[in-house]
Amino acid sequence: MPNNKITELFNIQYPIIQAGMVWASGWKLASAVSNAGGLGIIGAGSMYPEILKEHIEKCTKATDKPFAVNVPLLYPDIDKIMEIIIQEKVEIVFTSAGNPKTWTKHLQEHGVKVVHVVSGVKFALKSQEAGVDAVVAEGFEAGGHNGRDETTTFTLIPMVKEKITIPLIAAGGIATGRGMLAAMVLGADAVQVGSRFVATPEASSHQNFKEMVVKAQEGDTKLTLKELAPVRLLKNKFFEDVQKLYAENPSKERLIELLGRARAKKGMFEGDLEEGELEIGQISGLIHEIKPAAEIVKEMMHEFEAAKKEVSNL
Ligand SMILES: Cc1cc2nc3c(=O)[nH]c(=O)nc-3n(C[C@H](O)[C@H](O)[C@H](O)COP(=O)(O)O)c2cc1C
């Protein structure tokens, strides 16, 4: 496909970005996607600084193509994480869950391209003002932590596109070439794909979780815990426990107590499908098979080109 704003910005072949995901996207997944012509992202959100350093070094050895690191800005050791990113000469950083003003300039002064993830028009504008190189607009369908306004990808992308001039990446509910074409027709320059890449051999998530993602059907996920940080996850025993607690009109403290520590690790990394938190998007209902990341990229591009021809007959 011809170059566009995003392929040029990141120097990649295809406008497919593999989302940074806690407990899923380490160096193996990121380098596989980058080698396949997309942009792979290491998810720093579940890594201690020294672990992140190791992943960056391994990724650099596994690919000579560009890759990125995703940093949720509420991370406790943020200074150390940013120091490592600069030291290791990471070229692209995707920030999320925080104020884009805090780190953008500093990273850019060190030659890093910065993309910020938002879930609404107001924050897209704030990101543009902060000088980011591109924005990811993530809709209500998406797996993992999400916005409070429940704006779907289908409505969010054209609304953000109307207001910003910098490159726009669509996320939430995209797992196929058709979905990618739809997002680009709505105004996106590229897509960020999360859930689909969880069901790959290269994802570091537990096999039990991957198999549950493949079995998931329409209606099996829900956005919950809005009082803390809204998160879309699979309905399992932990989810039912949260629902039971809601029936008692709980304080925020009681919700925090139920969530406890390391729920996400327990579910997605250790494979405890009952007690763990299993973050995944609505599009899991369309994911039927665990398959290599490179195959996903190839199939998406193939379907994208075929669908483009098909719609020209409409
Ligand atoms: C298992 C999982 C973990 C995630 N972790 C993060 C994260 O650490 N940082 C982040 O910015 N987004 C995170 N997300 C959101 C993704 O980056 C991405 O925007 C989202 O998955 C896109 O929607 P989709 O799941 O429908 O493809 C996560 C999503 C999933 C499914």
Image: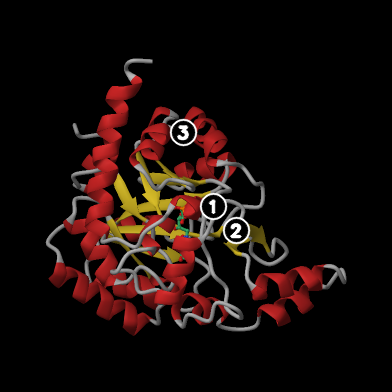
The image quarter containing residue 49 is bottom left
* Residue 66 in view (yes/no): no
Mark 3 crowd level (few <14, some 14–19, many ≥20, 10 Å Cα): some
Horizontal side of 275 relative to 116 (left or right) equals right
Reading the chain from its start, which is encountered first: label 3 or label 2?
3
Q: Is mark 2 on a helix, strand or loop?
A: strand
- On residue 164, the disc is 3
Residue under numbered circle 1? 282
Which of these two is toward me, 270 or 290? 290
User: Which residue is pictured at 19% across the width and 50% down the height?
Assistant: 37
162 w.r.t. 275: above or below = above
Query: Cβ–Cβ below 8 Å for labels 3 and 2?
Result: no
User: Which residue is pictured at 25% across the width and 43% down the height?
Assistant: 9
Mark 1 crowd level (few <14, some 14–19, many ≥20, 10 Å Cα): many
Query: Nearer the viewer's eye, disc 3 or disc 2?
Result: 2
* Residue 102 in view (yes/no): yes
Reading the chain from its start, which is encountered first: label 2 or label 1?
2
Mark 2 crowd level (few <14, some 14–19, many ≥20, 10 Å Cα): many
Reading the chain from its start, which is encountered first: label 3 or label 1?
3
Q: Quadrant of the C terminus?
A: top left
User: Which residue is pictured at 39% across the width and 75% down the height?
Assistant: 207
Residue under numbered circle 2? 221
Query: Cβ–Cβ below 8 Å for labels 2 and 1?
Result: yes
* Residue 201, x across and y down, in percent: 29, 69
* Residue 24, x across and y down, in percent: 39, 70
Q: Quadrant of the N terminus?
A: top left
Distance in Å between CA atoms under marks 3 and 2 = 31 Å
Q: Does the residue labelled 1 lie within 8 Å of ligand 1?
A: yes
